[in-house]
């Protein structure tokens, strides 16, 4: 079987993880030392039958997106993630895209925040992973590819991306995005092409971005107070807090209710509302 070694590697990584490591209850009757196959499938967004086939080495070649999802579900290190791509005969994706490796420590923190909307993004505002409450609050950002994977890019090129923000707040958000992108570009190696390509594309596509870029403002986005027009719950005012990786290339965002508002009760309703009413435009 072509992917026998791939299946064996997945199984070995699954068996080493304790349920408590990713926020799952151990349960009194677990028959395996690590995660069950159905748990890995759920964490990776795959069907149980599909994941079973992968472990048997009998499945079809997994996509790059599925490999990235499995790497996150199994808390693989960067070296293990790259090895998984090798076993699947897929090229290791360049850093910064939607398939970027997420540090296991950030994933661990994310899994321990089940009652708080939270997500991990890159310094170019590409969403890497969201918990269910973040999807319920902001919509599913995992479907975008290429330049559109970056919310900052969609903000300046697609009017629909601004739908959740009151129009009165658009100017401040635009300035914040531009200043943060300039800071991100400055932190990166001079040979980096990802940030340079994105900025060049935005300069060509958006007169608003070009005008703000010419002002040369620079400021890392460390926290925000946001107003969000949720389609089912109405206006929600939240604090958006940032925790940065050591190299600054990734950040964990989590959203808390703004003091002095009724947003606490509204955030509590997110689990009830779910994702059905949070429409996102087709990629």
Image (cartoon, rainbow, N blue to C red):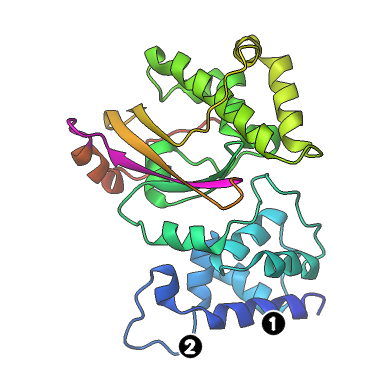
Q: Residue at x 65, y 9 (%)?
A: 207
Q: Which residue is drawn at 38% across and 12% down?
A: 168
Circle nearer the N terminus (1, 2) = 1
Q: Nearer the viewer, residue 270 or 100?
A: 100
- Residue holding disc 1: 8
- Quadrant assignment for the N terminus: bottom right
Magenta segment range?
249-263
Tell me residue 150's x, y (percent).
61, 34
CA distance for labels 1 and 2? 15 Å
**Regarding mark 2 in the picture, which secondary structure is present there?**
loop
Residue 179 image point, x, y percent? 56, 24
Identify the residue position indicated by label 2 in the image: 32
Q: Do the residues labelled 1 and 2 touch (CB within 8 Å)?
A: no
Q: How crowded is mark 2: few (under 14 residues within 10 Å), some or many (20 or more)?
A: few
Query: Looking at the rendering, which quadrant does residue 192 occupy?
Result: top right
Q: Is residue 47 at all visible to an observer of this figure?
A: no
Q: In this view, does 252 lie above or below 260?
A: below
With respect to residue 277, does 65 lie above or below?
below
Taking depth in this image into account, of 280 and 223 the one nearest to the observer is 223
Residue count near mark 1 (Cα–Cα under 10 Å), binned few <14, some 14–19, many ≥20: some
Instruction: State left or right for residue 39 relative to residue 230.
Output: right
Left or right: where 89 falls relative to 68 = right
**Count of numbered circles in the view:** 2
The stretch drawn in magenta includes residue 9: no
Q: In which quarter of the image is residue 6?
A: bottom right
Task: Reply above or below: 129 against 87.
Answer: above
Where in the figure is residue 218, as x and y percent of width and height?
57, 24
């Amino acid at each position: 079987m072509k992917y026998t070694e791939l299946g064996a590697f997945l199984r070995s990584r699954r068996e080493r993880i304790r349920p408590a490591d990713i926020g799952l209850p151990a349960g009194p009757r677990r028959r395996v030392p690590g995660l069950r196959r159905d748990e890995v499938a759920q964490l990776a967004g795959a069907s149980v039958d599909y994941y079973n086939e992968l472990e048997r080495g009998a499945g079809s070649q997994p996509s790059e997106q599925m490999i990235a999802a499995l790497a996150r579900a199994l808390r693989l290190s960067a070296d293990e993630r790259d090895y998984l791509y090798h076993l699947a005969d897929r090229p290791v994706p360049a850093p910064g895209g939607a398939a970027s490796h997420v540090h296991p420590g950030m994933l661990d923190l994310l899994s321990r925040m089940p009652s708080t909307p939270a997500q991990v993004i890159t310094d170019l505002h590409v969403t890497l992973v969201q918990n269910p409450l973040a999807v319920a609050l902001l919509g599913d950002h995992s479907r975008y590819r290429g330049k559109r994977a970056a919310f900052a890019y969609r903000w300046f090129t697609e009017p629909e991306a601004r739908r959740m923000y009151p129009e009165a707040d658009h100017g401040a958000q635009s300035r914040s995005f531009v200043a943060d992108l300039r800071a991100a570009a400055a932190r990166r190696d001079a040979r980096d092409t990802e940030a340079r390509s994105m900025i060049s594309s935005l300069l060509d596509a958006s007169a608003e971005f070009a005008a703000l870029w010419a002002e040369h403002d620079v400021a890392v986005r460390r926290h925000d107070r946001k107003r969000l027009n949720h389609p089912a719950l109405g206006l929600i005012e939240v604090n958006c807090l940032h925790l940065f990786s050591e190299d600054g290339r990734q950040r964990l965002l989590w959203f808390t209710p703004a003091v002095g508002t009724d947003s606490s009760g509204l955030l509590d309703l997110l689990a009830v509302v779910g994702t059905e009413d949070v429409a996102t435009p087709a990629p």
